[in-house]
Image (spheres, rainbow, N blue to C red):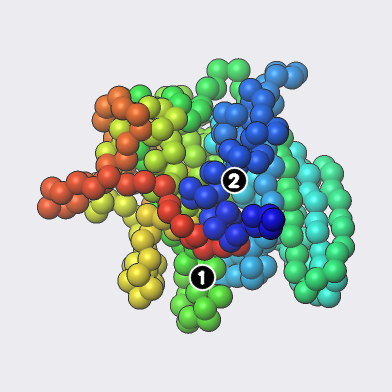
Amino acid sequence: MEDDKILMVHGSGGSATGELIDKIFDKEFSNKTLDQMEDSAVVEGAGRIAMTTDSFVVTPAEFRGGDIGRLCVCGTVNDLLMRGATPKYLTCGFILEEGLSIDLLKRVVHSMAETAREAGVEIVAGDTKVVNGHGEIYINTAGVGFVPDDVEISAGRAEVGDAIIVSGTMGDHHAAILSERMEIETDIESDNAPLGDIVRNLLENKIKVHTLRDITRGGLGTVLKELSESAKKTFTIEDELIPVSPKVRDFCGLLGLDPMYMGNEGKLVAFVAAEDEERALEIIRNSKYGSGAVIIGHVTEDSDGRLIARTAIGGERELDVLQGEGLPRIC
Ligand code: MG
């Protein structure tokens, strides 16, 4: 009998990815920390330490606005930040296919170093393997951060009344990668960026932040639906408030894509207490990479976890996580 095979759909970040994680990885690796399925694990130690790991397989390795080197630092740093941690250390593992351009590798490593400096982290350990192949590069980065004693930010903490704030426009990274691959002429750039300034400013100003999540694979729709289930709440958002740049909107129109399900690499969604919402919005807007922040809706009631999008003319539709494949190898 033939074994089942891994399919591209398993990497989409949507329902098939969730099933793969449940049935294979979580089944074997399950423990109290991992089962929380947070952006990074907060574990006991000397004080509280946040840890996370991520592998980067984006193709092409260089794209408008970034490259796999910037991406692998931002992705890992952002996952630490989403628990309120201060990112400190990264490790990196390179898997290089025979035939990879050494010039490309130098550019990628340089970009990693620059981005690490920007994000305030040190790369403290690494490893390289070379394998047969077609000249591609893959990078795994693991990250460690420290969590201040008084910070409790997690997926389940959203409360009825909380404002739902996104830090900027949706779909930029996804559109940049897809246009490169399809050789469509556009000047849409990836938004890949470390989000430390936003998180630091929110915490320093004592904003009551309940939940943070970076909006990556699967897009805003997937992230919000998953968070609604963790919090056991209904989130109600306004369709026309979701920020999308005119260029990305045109690109989506051309290809029939929905920006709600397109990934970013430098945007987050924040759930903040009702009394802090206007102040939080101002703080994010005045932070690096947060100038396009918008309040897109609120947590409206207790439930099993529902995501409702209201249209400008008063209609409502219920949204689910991304179904199907999405765009493979976006990060
Ligand atoms: Mg994340």
User: Looking at the rendering, which quadrant does residue 81 occupy?
Assistant: top right
Q: Is residue 108 left or right of residue 253?
A: right
Question: Where in the figure is residue 288, as x and y percent of width and height?
Answer: 51, 48
Q: Residues within 10 Å of mark 1 (few under 14, many from 20)?
A: some
Give the residue at mark 2. Answer: 20
Question: Where in the figure is residue 92, as x and y percent of width and height?
Answer: 78, 49
Residue at 35% x, 75% y is: 254
Front residue of 250 and 204: 250
Give the residue at mark 1. Answer: 178
Question: Which quadrant is home to the C terminus?
Answer: bottom right
Residue at 62% x, 49% y is: 75
Q: Amino acid at mark 1?
A: Leu
Question: Where in the figure is residue 125, as x and y percent of width and height?
Answer: 84, 44
Q: Residues within 10 Å of mark 2 (few under 14, many from 20)?
A: some
**Are discs 1 and 2 less than 8 Å apart at CB?**
no
Q: Secondary structure at mark 2?
A: helix
Front residue of 141 and 150: 141
Question: Where in the figure is residue 239, as x and y percent of width and height?
Answer: 26, 51
Front residue of 28 and 255: 28
Front residue of 44 and 163: 44
